[in-house]
Image (cartoon, rainbow, N blue to C red):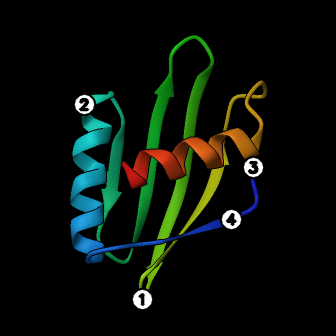
Amino acid sequence: MCEPFEIKMTGTARELIDKTRAKLQLQGGTLTGDEHSGKITLAVPIVGIIEGNYSVSGNVLTITVTEKPALLPCGLIQSKITDFLES
């Protein structure tokens, strides 16, 4: 498990969740939940599965990675998730 990290959002929580859900589905992942909290799952080819929980408070999204492949460092996962959400 990784330490929780925060991402400041632009737009509404609903817009971010809808956009993220669609992007994850294109990559074979899932997002279950709503604009307040939920769970994200994404399979990383060859390496394994990344799972985490999210919560939204105001314009801050907090993500906690709860399961990850042993070979992937938390810092790399955080960087990739941040890039993914900001693109």
From mark 1 to mark 3, how far is it between C-alphas? 25 Å
Q: Residue furthest top?
A: 46
- Say whether marks 4 and 3 touch (CB < 8 Å): no
Disc 3 crowd rating (10 Å Cα; few below 14, some 14-19, many 20+) is some
| Secondary structure of residue under mark 3 | loop
Residue at 34 percent across and 42 percent down: it is: 30
69 relative to 65, above or below: above
- Mark before the other along the chain sequence, 1 or 4: 4
Whichever of callouts 2 and 4 sits on the residue coming sooner in the sequence is: 4
* Residue 4 image label: 4
Q: Amino acid at mark 1?
A: Gly
From this view, report whether residue 5 is shown above or below residue 10. above
Q: Position of residue 43 (x, y in %)?
A: 48, 27
Q: Which residue is mark 3?
A: 1
Q: Which residue is mark 1?
A: 58
Nearer to us of marks 1 and 3 is 1
Q: Nearer the N terminus, badge 2 or badge 3?
A: 3
